Image (tube, rainbow, N blue to C red):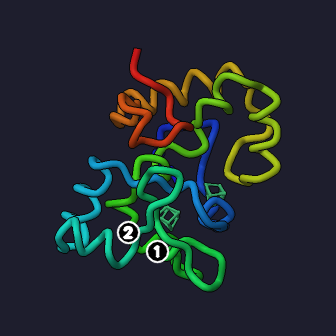
Amino acid sequence: MTNESQLTVFACRMCGHCCTGRGGIIVSPKDLQRLSVHMGLTPQTVLDRYCERMGGKWQVRCGDDGRCIFFRDGKGCAVHEGKPAICRAWPFFRGNLEDPLSWELAQDFCPGIDRHARHEDFAAQGRRYLREQNLLASDPSCEANALILKD
Ligand code: SF4
Ligand code: SF4
């Protein structure tokens, strides 16, 4: 869930679709530091309580309801200010910025994406947002593959 008011191509509707399903919420070392400070817990405690190792990377665990362990019905993300980069970057994933077909599929999945926006505007705003929010990746070995890499 992204939370930037200056965006015109996207505004989160808090439906929770992107917080559903196991895997994909990558926790890089930078994310772990952010979560740890936000939650007032040691990094090791955050890993032990809320994360699991999958596909060679740390990821946020899924609860019994099939949703991210931090998702709360009616309230959304319980760690909003500390959530990982992959959550802050959505829907501006590399595929959605580079491929109009992926972007159309993302529109079906995420009601927050403006269906009337042009793809080039979505991509331009998305790239600016990722730069401004320091959400460009530099190490694919521990960061999410869906993030745009720094030049
Ligand atoms: S799918 Fe879209 S609208 Fe729904 S919670 Fe995620 S970002 Fe928000
Ligand atoms: S950390 Fe928050 S925004 Fe990210 S998937 Fe979990 S509940 Fe959703």
**Label 1 element class:** loop
Indicate the amino acid at tag 1. Phe
Name the residue rendered at 61%, 85% in the picture. Answer: 64
Q: What element carries label 2?
A: loop
**Residue type beneath disc 2:** Val
In the picture of the structure, the residue carrying the numbered disc 1 is 70
Measured as percent of width and height from the top left, residue 40 is found at 18, 73
Tell me, yes or no, whether the two marked residues, 2 and 1, touch with CB atoms within 8 Å: yes
| Front one among 8 and 89 | 89
Q: In this view, does 24 lie above or below 7?
A: below
Decide if ligand 2 comes within 8 Å of the CB at mark 2. yes
Residue 16 shows which numbered tag? none
Q: Does the residue labelled 1 lie within 8 Å of ligand 2?
A: yes
Crowd tier of the residue under label 2, counting other residues whose Cα lies within 10 Å: few below 14, some 14–19, many 20 or above:
few
Near-viewer residue (144 or 38) = 144
Q: Please give the name of the residue rendered at 68% of the width and 19% of the height, measured from the top-left corner.
A: 120
Answer with left or right where residue 3 lies relative to residue 17: left
Q: What is the quadrant of the C terminus in the image?
A: top left
Q: Is residue 142 left or right of residue 90?
A: left
Residue depicted at 54% across the width and 30% down the height: 126
How crowded pointer 1 is (Cα within 10 Å; few <14, some 14-19, many 20+) is rated as some
Residue extending farthest to the top is 151
Which residue was labeled with disc 2?
79
